[in-house]
Amino acid sequence: MVGTTSGYEAAVDQFVTKMRRRQVVGSQSSAKLTAELLRLVVSHQRLPSSGQAAALIEAVKAVGVRIIAANPIELALGNIVRRVLHIIREEDVSLASDSILDSTLDSDDEDEFGNVARQSALSAVSVAAATRNTLRAPSLYNLLESVPGTAATQVARVPSATESEARSRSGDRNLMSRKLKHNVIEAITELLQEIDNCHSQVAEQALEHIHQNEVILTLGRSVTLREFLKEAKKKRSFQVVIAEGAPRYQGHMLARELADVDLQTTVITDSAVFAMISRVNMVIVGAHAVMANGGVVAPVGLHMVALAARRHAVPFVVLAGVHKLCPQYPHNPDTLLNDLKSPSEIIDFGEFSDCLDGSPGGSRTHVVNPSFDYVPPELVSLFITDTGGHNPSYVYRLVAEYYSPEDYVL
Amino acid sequence: MFAAGQHASTCHPHMIIAYRAGHKMKVSNMPVTEVKTGQDIPAGGVTFEWLRQAEDASLHRDQEVHTVAGVYGGQPFSVIEEFNFWRSKPELAEAVAAIKALTAVIKRSEASTMMGLEIELRNASDALKAWDETSISLTAGCNLFLRYVTRTSAVEYEDIAAGKARLIERGERFGEISQKARRTIAMLGQDFVHDGCTILTHGFSRVVLALLKLATANGKRFSVICTEGRPDNTGAEVAKELLSVGIPVTLILDSGVAYMMEKVDMVLVGAEGVVESGGIINMLGTYQAALVARTMNKPVYVAAESYKFARLFPLDQRDMSPSPRHVDFAEPIPPEVTVENSARDYTPPQYLTLLFTDLGVLTPSAVSDELIQLYL
């Protein structure tokens, strides 16, 4: 065990240190690095001959908990860890049901195994029913049917029933163990590709949403948004109003990037949003994370823009890759998920140091510099993800599709 | 008797009749015409086997209408008595007691086919529902168990003894499941209670109390405002329970909800029933509190176990079976004055923020998904 773990321990330590020092910025790069690291962990795991999925899950969870603890604000880390766990569970279940069907197909040929065939076919039906239940979130039916643990043991028990008359199948079992790892690694590679392509997938839908001569409003800078607008620019002509996004003024950078592709841009201060909103057709923004209730953790200032848009009946559209979808609910979003940055971004230390915290005269001025805002789901009109456009009330379905409920609490 | 590998619905026919609260099942000797809205005519068409079984079952049923309340295999048995016995235990919810009573019916059943067993259960369930027509959680519990029985028998068990044993085991475990449900909900919901918050609650709900007690046990400091809850005086009971664990309580009049709402951080209520739209049916006054909370941007959380999910879709307040409650007024009222004394109201889903259930935290739009998963 010591031998196998040292292979990736160094890589994990390095990654955790990087995340703690906030050297990795942006959810896409964090997500990619996490997925690559977990793929490394999976490929280095030496698995026992039975209960492999459980061993894999334990290993990934152990690493995952460390990664999440290194940077709890970056929700994409936890999302990718949970995605990988879900992948392992899914691959395990599909391999188990495949092997049952394989065994029944084999024994169907021989007459003496007729009874066995009938038994296996029936048990295949119940195994399929059990697997359907294990993959879905706990439902009213599962409530009465069984605890998810017993359903999993049902799946495991059925192969052992055929074990006694299939000693020659031990070769197949080793094949199955290698298959699980192989399938999981393949699926994680697909996940990496999906993260890479999220910008282009979202941008593909630009033409459906932006029409000729429209005025779009945004705040700050989002890479997804930039690609989205660039894609629309190819076939439509429209204008963009960019609120600069104090105190980091990233709106300026976006304005420069959009002007470079000949898009007509107007830069305004954040306080002018309410003044301009009535002249705007649509508000399109990026997000830091999307919570399970449809709420959005977005750069600071966007809650105000959302309120302005709601007040003037302007659609508020959020662009987010699926790796930003978080299966957790915001208990106390304003304090828990926020990153309070240095006040020097707002007030220069030199000028006001005599009335700031810890000064000799006592602290009279507190400077709070949050990086994120929480936008409740009622204010969002549409989510555009790489899988298409969705209502905020549909987010729970996406969560159920990509994550297993056993992994919500790690 | 059943060929291997055939899909269950073609070889094990059964009639599934959709239930609405208060709907009575019709008895007929012509089972073919009785099948409702395209459901469950077997895929291979109506065969002699199916007809024979269905006729047997409906004949059997005529006899059993009498046996449910009377002598049953030599012992006097009444499903209502059984239900009251379980109901008298204070920790058990109504739906759980109903399911335990139905389990007892299975134990004493002498049916020889799964279909016969289902008919008996349906009669027993009808009797229970007729006994208390207004209780939604009772109806929901009965429907849930019946639905579960139908699905189980369809998929897995040809042998009636094995099937019965399984159903009995499940039914008896259901009591544990309901206790576990309350614990799960308490664990999920207490995350949303933060230090220093003020919670408004309405009505007496054991789930909500379990949630608040767990939050206190985890070291959170908060205060609770509870409404008086006329005419049931739930407010006093809730206050007593909360004081016993050291939670500061403020009691207010029902009409004082809007007055206090500015001090409140969240509204937390239980539910008698959760309906298909994602809304809830709860004690009279819940809708009012939710309306006020929505206007003042306070979240409204509902704590409800999953067996309270009912197949109802009220379109307005009058669209439920009425459940009147006697109200005592301080002064005698002249008889010409009508008193509107419904005990409960319907809160539409747009006023609810989240539901804490043992299936997890759900948004109101996710509730109908769960119901479809069960009933499809």
Image (cartoon, coloured by chain):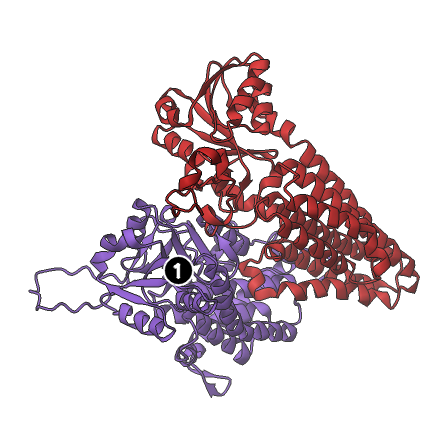
Chain colours: A red, B purple
Q: Which quadrant of the figure has residue B328?
A: bottom left
Task: Find residue B192 and report its horizontal and vertical position in percent.
Answer: 45, 56
Who's the residue at 62% across and 36% down the image? A26
**Side of A407 relative to A221 (left or right):** right
* Mark 1 neighbour density, 10 Å: few (under 14) some (14–19) many (20 or more): many
Q: Which quadrant of the figure has residue A149?
A: bottom right
Task: Find residue B372 and report its horizontal and vertical position in percent.
Answer: 51, 51
In terms of secondary structure, where does tag 1 sit?
A: strand
Who's the residue at 45% across and 58% down the image? B309
Query: In front here: B220 or A139?
Result: B220
Say if A186 sits above or below B76 in the image.
above
Say if A401 sits above or below A228 in the image.
below
Task: Find residue A55 and report its horizontal and vertical position in percent.
Answer: 76, 60
**Side of A263 relative to A185 (left or right):** left
Q: Quadrant of the N terminus of chain A?
A: bottom right
Who's the residue at 90% across and 61% down the image? A170
Query: In front here: A288 or A116?
Result: A288
Q: Give the amino acid at mark 1.
A: Gly
Can residue B88 be seen at all in this image of the molecule? yes
Of all chains, the one bearing label 1 is B
Task: Find residue A362 and report its horizontal and vertical position in percent.
Answer: 39, 48
Who's the residue at 55% across and 53% down the image? B373
Q: Circle 1 sits on which residue?
A: B273
Say if A145 sits above or below A188 in the image.
below
Query: In front here: B318 or B80?
Result: B318
Q: Quadrant of the C terminus of chain A?
A: bottom right
**Side of B6 relative to A225 (left or right):** right
Can residue B112 be seen at all in this image of the molecule? no
